[in-house]
Structure formats: structure tokens, C-alpha cells
Image: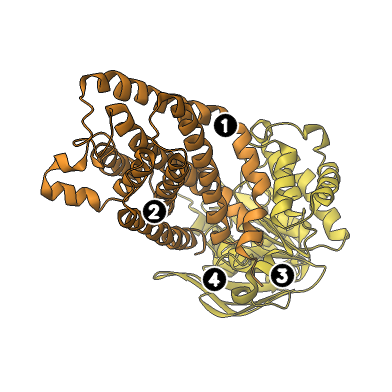
Amino acid sequence: MIVARGLRKSFGDFEAVKGIDVEVRRGEAFGFLGPNGAGKSSTMRMIASVSPISGGTLEILGMDPAKDGPAIRGRLGVCPQEDTLDNELNVRDNLYIYGRYFGIPKGEVNSRVDELLEFVSLTEKAKSKVEDLSGGMKRRLTIARSLVNKPDLLLLDEPTTGLDPQARHVLWDQLFRLKQAGVTLVITTHYMDEAEQLCDRLVVMDKGLIAAEGSPRQLIEEHSTREVAELRFNIQDEGNPHELIAHKIEDLGRLEVLPDRILVYSPDGEEVIAKVHERGLDPIAVLVRRSTLEDVFLKLTGRTLVD
Amino acid sequence: MSLSLAEGTLRQSDYWWTVFKRTWKGGAISSFISPLFYVVAMGVLLGGFIAGDPAKLEGATSYLSFIVPGLVATHAMQIAVGETTYPVMGMMKWHKTYYSMIATPLEPRHLVAANLMFVLFRLATACGVFMLVLAPFGVFESWWGPFLAFGSQLLVGMAFAGLVYGYSARIRNEAAFGVLFRLGVLPLTLFSGAFFPISNLGPVLEWVARFTPLWHGVNLSRMFCLDTVDWSTAALNAGVLVAAIVVGWFWAVSGLEKRLVD
């Protein structure tokens, strides 16, 4: 569906995307995971065929976006990071008018709009003003709008940023159902839980480059351990700074020393905690958890995803 | 394959129809009532103090019949500027409507074309009704002249629509509209021959006035209304306006392309 080779994007002197190779296959959910400013949105806009590439090659649905932009866009659904709904129109008209931009005949758009409102549970809000919708509803409406042309490929740029946990889960459920229905999804996110929930395969992006590629499980297996022990010490204790503590436990596993806690990567987190106590250290809080993509990102870049 | 200009423009007709439905009431007030105030205040009341000497008023027998064709042409410019400043900025910057539009097969030139067609529609209704309202005042000297005057008002409106659209697409901050209104629209309104013959400006400023697109529209509109048509001047006036429309079109499309496709 998408093949990028050495793909680049520059804005003046600033290079947002510095040569990436990506291949997205039909029917999969593919993710770009990375912090803000990693180049995800720039990549997404090139794939959406609204931003010309600065270097490399890019092929979408077997076509060249520089030549066949309108034809490609006719088969894409785009859910942008910022809501671009028309606040002056009601919910139904937002979908109807958008469908008309694709040249879909009036009768056909009307029946499709009804189906989509049903799909995103907004049928009862059909006549409401967009302004009166909650953030989650607006995002669902944007997703419904992006589906109006029955796209082969759905692009979702930070789909759940700014939503409360409940609204995120509703949205994830809907995206999951789309995936089940065979729609190819491309998602950018800086939430590792979102990437783990939705993506079959993903690339970790940092500073315009791809740092790693694989399924969430593969990436975790390759770049992290099964478990992580999180240790919190009293930050006030200046006589015993994190660096000194870390020195005492550095043989227990790979360490990440963060300002507020120390992470110890080990196949067995409980054992790590026991050994920490044996050495006379007294953390004020401990937590043993499974490794996540956040840990993968931390290892690959030395930074956390959400700064 | 790119969509044809007509097809891409037509696909936005439902959108602009909804814009019309929600704005026509406010538009009606500003389009018809405020110019009518101008006609009554300046043409009838102030005009009562001005001797209607055809030799000094470019052939008009009263100040009212002198000022009316210029006022409608100036009004066309103001409508065009009004429709291509804040609304265009809103579609790019505040509501981001254009960004959602170009995620579809539509391209910037289609957006410009549909937007300008809407401006043309606004101009046609506003100037058309205005001319109808003026007919009973006895300011038209022939039955056919007002129709051609109406056409010249559309030309001058569209000349400004494209040029100002291109300006709006290039500025980042709406404060720049203040400059446009104060240094562009206001002096053009006052000094392009709508309120007094430009020969009163003195030889140098008269020539400056002749280079403004608005004067060409005012002059054309007036010649047709007063039945004082000099066809070679009319051809020049119309030619300048058509040229401004062509330049404005390319300036607007390239401005929007630069803005949306980066």
C-alpha cells in the first residue's frame, strides 16, 4: 500500500524527515511511534499527498503522489491531528458535504452518512452543531468523515491526543473494528499504549529517523527484558543521590536512571526488589511491571516519549 | 489525473450553498441598506447643494446621477474585499476548512475558483438589487446602459476579489488587513472618481487615479448609466479590469498553493 525509500522532508534548512524506509502492507495496522517533533506528522502529510517529498521515493497505492495526488487522495481517508470540522455546520452536513468533495452522488452520500453516524454512535446527534460536541465525539465525527469515501487506506495522526481515557477506549474499539473489516490503518502516536493496542507493526521514530521496526512484541523482546522493576527513592535524600544508589545495584540488570525513579530491566522483577532490600536500600515505592514500548524507546533514544 | 476546474468547483457547491444560507441575512443588510444610506445622504441630501452642471459632472445632469454609478462600482469593490479578507483567512487559519478540503481530490485552484464564484454570486445579487432600487430615481439615461453598467460592476468586483484573495493567502496575521483597508480601500473609495470627477484632483493625481482599477470600474459604470459612452475608453477600461482579473486569478492560486502545500 505504501512504499517509501530514503524518504526526506525539509522545510528550508530544517530537515524534519531524514531518509526513512517504510513499507505498509494491505490490511495491517501500521504505526509511527515517536515523541513530538520526531517527523511523524511530516511523514503522514507526505503520505496524504498534500506535502511534496524533498528526497527519496514514495509510492502510495501503486501511484506517485507528485503525479497522481488527486487520484491517491480519492482513495485515502485522513483523520488529522487538529480537528478540521466545520463548526458552522451540523454533524450530518459535515459528513454530507465532505462526501460531495469526492464526487459521490447525492443519494449515495446520504445513505453512507447514515451508516457512518451509526458506526460512530452519533445518529442522535445528527442535527447538533459541531461546537456542542465533546472532544471524543468530535474525533469520532472526524473519523466518520475520513471514511465517507470508503478509503483503502486510513491515515490517523495522533487519533486520541487530548481525549479522556474513556473516549480513547471507545475510539480504539472503533478503529479495531475497522481493522477487522480489512481497512489498512496508518497511525502516528506518542502513546505507547495506543501503539501496543492497535498496531500490528510499527516503526519507532526519533529526530527524523527510524530507530527500530517490528511488531510491538518483537520490539519489546529485542530491546527490553520481560519485566521492569521501578524503584522510587526519597529525592530529598541528598546524601544518597540516584547515581550512588545506581552504583550499588548495577549488577542486577540494565538500569535507566530517571530524575524521579530508577528502572531495572530484568526477567524477574520481584527478585530485583528482594535483592535491593537485601543491600540495605529502602525505596519509598516499588513497582514490577511488564516491559512496554516506552522502555524500548527509552533504550533506543535515552529519552522518554512524553517529555 | 487531476479534476477539471469545473468539476472540482462544482463539487463544492453544496458547501457554498450552506455558507449562503447562513450568511444571506447579514449580507442583505450590508449589501443593500448601507449603500442606500450613501445614496440618500450623499446623492440626494448633499447633492441638493451641488449644481448639476453636465460640463463639470462628466455629463451628469444632477449630482445624484453622477454619484450613483460610482457608488455601486465602489460598493462592488468593498463587497469583494470583504469576502476575500477575513473569510479567506478564516478558512486557512481559524477553521482550517481548506486543509480538510485539500485532503480530498480537490486542489487549491478548485478552492479558489469556488470561493471566487461565491464572491461573483454575492456581487451579482448585491449590485443587481441595488441597481433595481435606483431605477425609480431617474438616474439612468438609457434602458440598455444599466445592464452593461451592471457587468462593469461585476468586472471591478472580480478584479479586486482575485487580487485581495492573493494578498490574504500570503499574510500570516490578520493585522495586515488594517493596512489594506486604510491604505488601499479607503483612499480608493474616496479618490477614484466616485464622489467627484478625477479632473478635480489636478493633472498629476488625476493620472494616479487613472491607474487604479477602481477608477476604470467607476468610469465604465458611469459611462453606461449616463449614456456618455466613448467606446475606445470603454474598451480600455474593460481591458484593464479583465487583465486585473487574470492577474488576480494566478496570484490567488499561487498564494493558496504556497500556503496549503508545503
Q: As rendered, which of B112 and B155 lies closer to the eye? A: B155
Give the chain of mark 3.
A
Task: State the residue lying farthest toward the front.
Answer: B142
Does any portion of residue A49 appear in the rendered image?
A: yes
Q: As rendered, which of B58 and A167 lies closer to the eye? A: B58
Q: Mark 4 vs mark 2: same chain? A: no
Distance from label 4 to label 1 (Cα)? 38 Å
Mark whose residue sits in front, 2 or 3: 2
Q: Which residue is mark 3?
A: A219
Q: Amino acid at mark 1?
A: Trp
Q: Amino acid at mark 4?
A: Pro
Give the chain of mark 1.
B
Q: Which residue is mark 1?
A: B24
The orange-coloured chain is labelled B
Disc on the earlier residue, 1 or 2: 1
Q: Which residue is mark 2?
A: B163
Q: Which residue is mark 4?
A: A52
Q: Mark 3 vs mark 4: same chain? A: yes
Measuring 42% from the left and 43% from the top, which residue is drawn there?
B149
Mark whose residue sits in front, 4 or 2: 2
Distance from label 1 to label 2 (Cα)? 24 Å
The yellow-coloured chain is labelled A
